[in-house]
């Protein structure tokens, strides 16, 4: 019998001053989807995270949202132990509903955390409520074992924006026990390191605690409806204070919870974010920091460098912070989360070596080369990782034609957001790591007799001081095909001709094409990647393949390892 998914908790983001709409939303925005009129079939309508998970044939969940009720005041709950756990009378499991909803067990259930039903409004209060919810899910696992009889394996959590800060605070509260209570966490546009645009006017967030007290005093002096408005403002200010951009509080989470079990999903499309004031403020802040007047480097609200954590994997999605077709309402978030939670294999792509043979600045000007990649698996009409000059998230700027130098993101993230260096290139990890992601081989190879196929888009460009910015040196599309086995084989195609299962249905047929003699001077259409034990900073075995174009020559290194045993190369 297959292992069922762990219970999944969804945590929404900041609701601003008036949260009545959030309190009236049954699924806290996690069932708001997007329609893509220019696509067909399954890609036409994305129903929303909850409904998509309920309908999935691979990881089908059961909705358990209304099994738990949330109250702003203490209610009568019989049978509580003495002393009572925090929030035991405000986050309450309904036994009658549980008997109906959890008849099949707790594994594979979804729980939407409705923290805006709790009072007072504060990150600490919400975190205590989340800890109580996790305790109730653990209790329900014992009370409702279901047919599988699986015991407690912790919960998975997907959190949007401020929801990730609540999760961080809950992990601090749980301490070392968080490692057994929580399995994995995915954050969507969470400002782990604060919201940088709040530096205009300077010191705004530092002054919030004083302002909070002033508003509280003012509230008591106001009559009627004005008092209600002031009360909402006071509550929202306390939450906003958690977005302080000049703190290192996020670092202590890694002391009790493995950062590799946290995936940070980073948005890059600041242009479609509805709150234009936030976008403009980010741009002004970039100018002050040396990022240039054209710089934004955000999802419209949260800076890309703020949405990441040191030691945690990250992925870029070209979506804005919130609203229609955003980090929380687009299919990308769902697809990435499912692969991270249930993937059998981890894939890592690195740059082995590179040489730019054209371009470059003249005279006293400094070269500013950029490299970016985008990844799309077969059968998914969305990029699972996307870099572009438009998104302002390529690796660079490099002054070396060999793309050498630069730092590592994890090291840079140890410093406050105010000390982020936009003109210093930061690789995703050692060995010039470009991207790491997850796949579920059990499902990926189930329907494809000719292996697993990924599209790889490679971009190399430069910023030109002569006025022609974003000059393209190379833009190339490749297809990577992996056949499992012992040993596994990896092929790189320059086109789709030999990916057709009717033309090349198996390993032998593709291998024959890669070995066929070619006329001198012609580039092979199918390249058999070379097994490589590593070179330089690359220590993990994998495959090397070349990418050549008019102005660029490079060797890339791809690793496929067991998700539960990163040192074992296998597919």
Image (cartoon, helix red, strand yellow):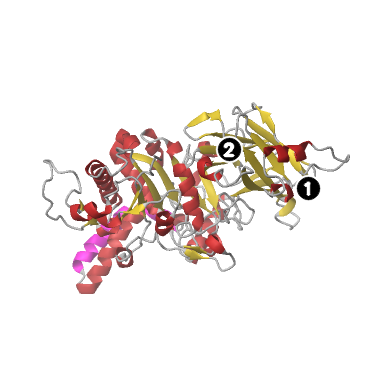
Q: What is the magenta range? A: 201-221
Look at mark 1 in the image and give the residue it sits on: 359
**Secondary structure of the magenta portion, mostly?**
helix
The image shows residue 72, relative to residue 20, as above or below, that is above
Which quadrant of the structure image shows residue 296? bottom right
Q: For the point 84% across and 37% down, which residue is it?
A: 517
Name the spot of residue 373 as percent of width and height, x first.
64, 47
Look at mark 2 in the image and give the residue it sits on: 348
In the rendered view of the protein, which quadrant contains the N terminus? top left
Q: For the point 24% across and 65% down, which residue is it?
A: 218
Q: Would you say the residues marked 1 and 2 are in contact, meaning their CB atoms lie under 8 Å apart? A: no
Q: Nearer the viewer, residue 485 or 138?
A: 485
Q: Which is nearer the N-term, disc 1 or disc 2? A: 2
Per the rendering, the mark at residue 533 is: none
Mark 1 falls on what kind of element? Answer: loop
Instruction: Mark 2: give few (<14), some (14-19) or many (20+) Cα within 10 Å.
Output: some
Task: Tell us which disc is closer to us: 1 or 2.
Answer: 2
């Amino acid at each position: 019998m297959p292992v069922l998914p762990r219970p999944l908790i969804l945590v929404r983001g900041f609701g601003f001053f008036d949260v009545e709409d959030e309190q009236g939303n049954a699924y806290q925005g996690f069932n708001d989807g997007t329609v893509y009129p220019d696509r067909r079939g399954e890609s036409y309508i994305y129903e929303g995270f909850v409904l998509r998970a309920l309908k999935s044939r691979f990881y089908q969940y059961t909705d358990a949202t209304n099994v738990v009720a949330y109250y702003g005041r203490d209610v009568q709950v019989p049978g509580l132990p003495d002393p009572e756990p925090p929030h035991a009378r405000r986050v309450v499991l309904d036994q009658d509903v549980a008997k109906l909803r959890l008849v099949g067990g707790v594994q594979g259930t979804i729980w939407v955390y409705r923290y805006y039903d709790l009072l007072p409004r504060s990150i600490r209060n919400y975190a205590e409520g989340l800890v109580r919810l996790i305790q109730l899910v653990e209790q329900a696992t014992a009370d409702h074992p279901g047919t599988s009889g699986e015991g407690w394996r912790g919960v998975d959590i997907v959190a949007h924006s401020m929801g990730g800060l609540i999760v961080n605070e809950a992990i601090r509260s749980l301490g070392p026990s968080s490692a057994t209570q929580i399995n994995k966490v995915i954050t969507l546009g969470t400002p782990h390191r604060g919201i940088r645009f709040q530096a205009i006017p300077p010191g705004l967030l530092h002054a919030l605690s004083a302002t909070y007290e002033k508003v509280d005093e003012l509230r008591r002096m106001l009559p009627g409806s004005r008092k209600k408005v002031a009360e909402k403002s006071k509550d929202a200010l306390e939450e906003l204070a958690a977005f302080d951009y000049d703190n290192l509080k996020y670092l202590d989470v890694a002391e009790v919870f493995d950062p590799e079990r946290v995936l940070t999903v980073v948005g890059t499309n600041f242009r479609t974010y509805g709150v234009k004031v936030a976008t403009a403020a980010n741009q002004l802040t970039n100018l002050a920091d040396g990022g240039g007047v054209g710089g934004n480097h955000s999802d419209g609200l949260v800076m890309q460098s703020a949405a990441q954590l040191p030691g945690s994997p990250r992925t870029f999605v070209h979506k804005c912070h919130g609203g229609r077709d955003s980090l929380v309402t687009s299919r990308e978030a769902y697809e990435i989360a499912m692969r991270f939670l249930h993937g059998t294999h981890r894939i890592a792509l690195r740059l082995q070596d590179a040489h730019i043979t054209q371009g470059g600045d003249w005279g006293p000007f400094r070269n500013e080369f950029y490299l970016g990649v985008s990844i799309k698996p077969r059968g998914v009409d969305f990029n699972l990782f996307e870099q572009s000059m438009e998104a302002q998230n390529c690796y660079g700027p490099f002054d070396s034609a060999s793309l050498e130098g630069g730092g590592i993101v994890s090291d840079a993230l140890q410093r406050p957001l105010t000390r982020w260096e936009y003109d210093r290139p930061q690789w995703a990890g050692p060995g010039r790591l470009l991207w790491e992601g997850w796949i579920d081989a059990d499902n990926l190879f189930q329907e494809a007799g000719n292996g697993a196929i990924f599209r790889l888009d490679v971009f190399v460009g430069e910023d030109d001081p002569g006025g022609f910015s974003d000059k393209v040196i190379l833009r190339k599309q490749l297809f990577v095909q992996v056949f499992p086995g012992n040993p596994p084989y990896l092929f790189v195609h320059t086109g789709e001709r030999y990916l057709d299962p009717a033309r090349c249905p198996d390993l032998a047929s593709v291998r024959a094409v890669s070995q066929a003699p070619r006329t001198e001077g012609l580039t092979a259409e199918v390249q058999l990647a070379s097994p490589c034990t590593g070179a330089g900073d690359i220590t993990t075995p994998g495959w090397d393949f070349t990418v050549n174009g008019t102005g660029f020559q490079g060797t890339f290194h791809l690793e496929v390892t067991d998700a539960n045993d990163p040192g074992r190369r296998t597919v």
